[in-house]
Structures are given as structure tokens and as C-alpha cells.
Image (cartoon, rainbow, N blue to C red):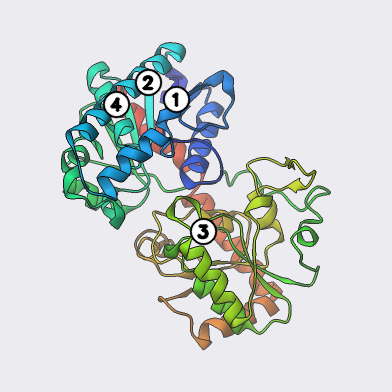
Amino acid sequence: MSIWDRKRPSFGFISTRFAGLDGVSLETRKWADMLTSKGCPVYYMAGKLDTDPAISHLAPKAYFKHEQIVKVQDAIFVEKKRTSEISRKIQELKEELKAEIGKFHSKFGFEILVVQNALAIPVNIPLGLAITEFIIETEIPTIAHHHDFFWERERFYSPISTDYLRGAFPPVHPKIQHVVINSIAGHKFGNFTGASWTLIPNVVDFKVLPPEIDNYNRDLRKDIGLDKDSLLVLQPTRVVSRKGIEIAAELVKRLGHPKASLVITHKAGDEGQEYLMRIEEFVRLIKVDLKIISDKIGVKRGFDENGRKIYTLWDVYQHADFVTYPSIYEGYGNAFVESIYFKKPIVINRYPIFVADIEPKGFDVISFDNYITKDTIDKIKNLIKNSRRLAQIVEKNYMLGWRYLSYEMLEEKIEQLLINHYGS
């Protein structure tokens, strides 16, 4: 008998935000979808939410952009000057947030806490401290799902944050089971903490066929300024330097297609605007048509305040001719999984996680090492022309995705975590 037949525990998700198209929010929705399909209630707490208010608890200071959080974070990681006032303020914010977590738990009575990245990357130190103390004081069974660790981001190196990072990013406690999204992160986590870990990569529900172009999104190309015969090269990422967008722009230029456009779906995000300005200058210099359409992309279809259509990321995938993924570093790669799901050919840089965790599974992609060559361009051109070969590749990749990156895999992994807690 499966543990799902004996237990239908409720889950409380906590993070700094559950809203928009960031990787943590997207992956949390997938976990929640799988859990609810097994009959498990789910609830949410964050500082920014677009989840159902009936099952959500908003705690504004959990958001990493709350003005009080920004002030203490800047003191620690930008100014690198920690006064007694800053230490005291962090403790005050921690106590406030711990009280909010208590309210969240009292309101919904969930049995298992799932912390989404808030105990890995210290964008909100008081929140991480509050969650850690809540777990220790209540001994609530916890799954800590880590997407990015502080040692993977240079901006989080600060000699005055050592006690916070050692204590809560991530904490080690018998009631916490740790989940990482790639094996390299898992090994580094193990070396840093001495704790065990479970690998759960990013997933998609492969048993549900990808949607096709419909009446709503049929005009998407026209709405973003493309013709039916334009070559839509999709970069489904944020505009940040580790995404290697210069390489995607160079690729589009070297294809020599008269109507090729590089389409980027996400905005710069929380890492500043300087790189965006560099990319805009670079594409002007090499004369590549760049379209950043983040203002047209939302979590759900609808209309903005001016009556213009809002599309989903999945609408854009349906119109893409192929996907570029020239990232220098990724935690795993949501864009890779989604491209496989939508049966799109992928041009990808062999970033470390791809080499360690994805490439050995046999996916058929056009890969390169850090920079593109004439051979890379020739392979792309030949694949675009060979519709039969293209169909074979994307179908093979879809089936591999179903095997390795599906909800069924996620279900098995979480079932094992539940067995670890409840027993077989």
C-alpha cells in the first residue's frame, strides 16, 4: 500500500514571494499541483503572493524588497558594516516574522512545512532566522527545498554575516529534510553542512500534452511585431549576465536569416539594470532585432489596464522556432525542461549542471562550450531545414523528459520523504 493511500498530509509553503514567473514560484506551483492531485491540502505564506487568498497568509516583511528588509540587507551585503543597531533590527524583524509564521500555522494547521529557497539564499536574513527558530521550537516536520545557495552568488560574501549564514542558510536539524535541484549543489551542501540531501530536479507534467496554438494566442507574433514567416528565437529567461544573452544575440546574427528576432520573456529582475543596458547597446551594435516582451507576459491570460492582451510564458513557447539557452550557470534549468515539454529544439551551452545531471540522460540538443562556432550555426541551419529530423529529436526528448523530469518522478521523491518521516 502506497503512503498516499494512508496519509494525506497538508503542506504549508513558505518563501519570500510566491508570485510571477521566477523559478521558485514556478516550481512551487508544480509541487502544489502534484500534492493536491494526491488529495493533500496546500497553503502559502510569503511577502508577495498571487495565490488564492483563501489558502494564503500575507506577511509583507517576508518580501525581500520590503523597505525594512532592504535596509538591513544593504548594511550586511553592500555596506558591509554591522552596527549594534543593525543586529538589533534584524532580531526585531526575526521576531515579527516568527510571529507571522505562527499565525500562518495556527490559521491552517498544516502538518508539513515546505520552505522554498528561504533557507538557502539570504535575500531576507530575518526570514531565514525566523523559519529556523520556528522549526526548532515547534519541531514541525520540514522539507527545505533549496534552489540557490549563498556560496553560488558572489554578492552574498560578507565577513559580517557568518553567524547568520552558518545558523540558517541552511540550518541543520533532525526535523529538516533537505532537497536540492542538482547534484553539484548537493555535494557542496553536504560538504558545508555534513547533512544528507535528496535530489529533485525541476519538473513538468509530461502526461498532459502541451497545449497548441488557439484563438487566444494565434496573434501573438503580430502583437510582438513579428510576421508569420519571422524566425522566432526564444530566450525564456531573465536579463541577467549569467544567462549569456550576448551569445544568443550573436547566434541570431550569424544565422543570417532576414527576419530573425531574439525574443526574451522576462525582465531584468532583482540584479539591476546595467546588464540590460549593455545588451540593448550590443544588439544595436551588431544589428539584431531584440524584443523583450516581459510587459506582455503574466501568470495567467488576461488584459492589462490599456486593454492589451497578456499572454503566458507557455503561449510564447508554442510560437518559438527554437530556444536558446546559453547560460553560464543554472541551478537546474526551468527553460530546458519547458523547451523539452513543448517539443522545441534547443541550442544550449554546456553549463556545469547540464554536463553533470542532464547530458548523461541522452537528450538530443545542439550544444556548445562557452562560445558558438561555425559548426554550431551549421547544425542549427540544417535542423531548421530538416523537418523530419526535427520531429524525431523533439519526440525523443519529450519521452526522456517524461522519464526523468515528470510529476511521476516528483511524486516518488516526495513519497520517499514522507516515508522518512512517517515510516513505511
What mark, if any, has residue 100 been given in the picture?
Answer: none
Name the residue beneath numbered marker 3: 336
Q: Quadrant of residue 74?
A: top left
Q: Is residue 210 left or right of residue 279?
A: right
Mark 4 vs mark 2: which is more N-terminal?
4
In the rendered image, the quadrant that contains the N terminus is: top left
Q: CA distance from mark 3 to mark 1?
A: 33 Å
Mark 3 vs mark 2: which is more N-terminal?
2
Residue 120, visible in the rendered structure: no
Q: Is residue 289 above or below residue 152?
A: below
Which amino acid type corresponds to the residue marked 2 in the rendered image?
Answer: Ile
Image coordinates for residue 309, horizontal then vertical, percent: 77, 47
Residue 223, visible in the rendered structure: yes
Q: CA distance from mark 4 to mark 1?
A: 12 Å
Name the residue beneath numbered marker 4: 94
Residue at (52% x, 63% y) in the render: 276
Closer to the eye: label 1 or 2: 1
Which amino acid type corresponds to the residue marked 1 in the rendered image?
Answer: Ala
Question: SS at mark 2?
Answer: helix
Q: Is residue 217 left or right of residue 136?
A: right
